[in-house]
Amino acid sequence: MLKNAGWVLIGPDMFVLAAMVTPAVMILATSSLILTTTNRLVRVVDRVREMLPEFEALASSDLPDNPKMAMLFDDLHRATVRARVGQQALAQLYLGLGAFVATSIALGVYDLCAARCRLDVPPFRGRWRRVTVQRERPSYR
């Protein structure tokens, strides 16, 4: 890092770290959403397990209570819909998490290749060109 009149010039290594931190923050946010969605799915499963003894009691009784049975089936239908929506949300969140991880890895590999080969590789341009490193010679005037 170079300091010049109060301004800080970031070196090329810091650019890579800064570029890799952004997907890391997004990975953290997506992981938090995955955890919350998973907890909601667990609550749905617990609700269905709580309804199971009531279903068994109604099935084993001689006189089934039709309104209560209809209410239990309605609750079971809602829980099923919630579970399906939760599963779809989890699939999308895991897809997003994979994309953020792949982005972070791709940025690291990109910089490693560019640094090792001394290539100035603009992203998504498709042209590779070799860069010659020129050092400034001190002037003795």
Image (cartoon, rainbow, N blue to C red):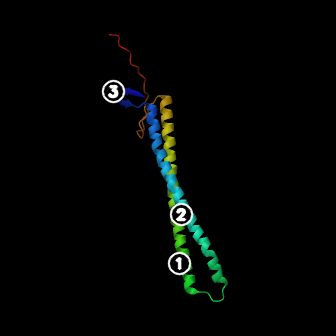
Q: Which residue is mark 3?
A: 5
Under circle 2, the secondary element is helix
The residue indicated by pointer 2 is 40
The answer to whether 93 is drawn above or below residue 74 in the figure is: above
In front: mark 2 or mark 3?
Answer: 3
Which residue corresponds to mark 1? Answer: 74
Residue flagged by tag 1: what amino acid is it? Asp
Q: CA distance from mark 2 to mark 3?
A: 53 Å
Between the C-alphas of marks 1 and 3, the distance is 70 Å
Q: Which residue in the rendered view is the most extreme toward the front?
A: 6
Query: What is the quadrant of the C terminus in the image?
Result: top left
In the image, what residue occupies the spot 52% across and 59% down? 36
Asked if residue 25 lies left or right of residue 139, the reply is right
Q: CA distance from mark 2 to mark 1?
A: 19 Å
Residue 121 percent location from the top left of the image? 43, 34
Find out whether the residues at labels 2 and 1 contact each other: C-beta distance under 8 Å: no
Image point 45% across, 34% down: which residue?
Answer: 14
Mark 3: amino acid: Ala
Q: Secondary structure at mark 3?
A: loop
> Depth-wise, is mark 2 or mark 1 nearer the camera?
2
Residue at image position (51%, 37%) is 109
Q: Earlier in the sequence, mark 2 or mark 1?
A: 2
Which of the marked residues, 2 or 3, is nearer the chain's N terminus? 3
Nearer the observer, 118 or 14 = 14
86 is higher (above) or lower (below) than 3: below
Residue 101, relative to residue 3: is it above or below? below
Q: Position of residue 111 (x, y in %)?
A: 48, 35
